[in-house]
Amino acid sequence: MDQPPPVELVRHVATSTGLPLATATRVVADVLAFFGETAEEYVRRRHRELKHRGLKNDQIWGRVAAELASRPVAAGRLSERQLRRIVYG
């Protein structure tokens, strides 16, 4: 993340949780970075993680598509073909 997190959001998190300002800043920055992934970055990362766990592509594509559909910053619906193209080009 290139810019600091929004001050008002950091203050809200610090106030509502009792966290020190520096900790709240780190937490907000981490959450924003996590949800700042593009659909392509997310698909590549999850494919790598699930392959590393030993899952096969047939198991991975449906799972990744369902995960994308439920993300707070929702990506558009992607077909299995589109998911494969993101990973393999």
Image (tube, rainbow, N blue to C red):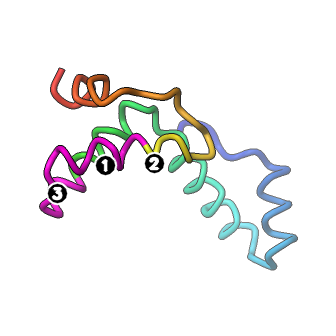
Circle 1 crowding by C-alpha within 10 Å: few under 14, some 14–19, many from 20:
some
Q: Secondary structure at mark 1?
A: helix
Which residue corresponds to the image point at 85% horizontal and 50% vertical from the top-left? Answer: 8
Q: Is residue 51 magenta?
A: yes
Q: Quadrant of the C terminus?
A: top left
Query: Is residue 71 depicted above or below 41 in this figure?
Result: below
Query: Is residue 37 depicted above or below 86 in this figure?
Result: below
Residue highlighted by disc 1: 46
Residue highlighted by disc 2: 67
Amino acid at the residue labelled 3: Leu
Query: Is residue 38 depicted above or below 35 in this figure?
Result: above
Which residue corresponds to the image point at 52% horizontal and 27% vertical from the top-left? Answer: 76
Q: Position of residue 70 (x, y in %)?
A: 56, 47
Residue highlighted by disc 3: 55
Decide which of tag 1 and tag 2 comes sooner along the chain. 1
Amino acid at the residue labelled 1: Arg
| Label 2 – label 3 distance at C-alpha | 16 Å
Q: Position of residue 34 (x, y in %)?
A: 51, 50
Q: Secondary structure at mark 2?
A: helix
Q: Is residue 73 magenta?
A: no
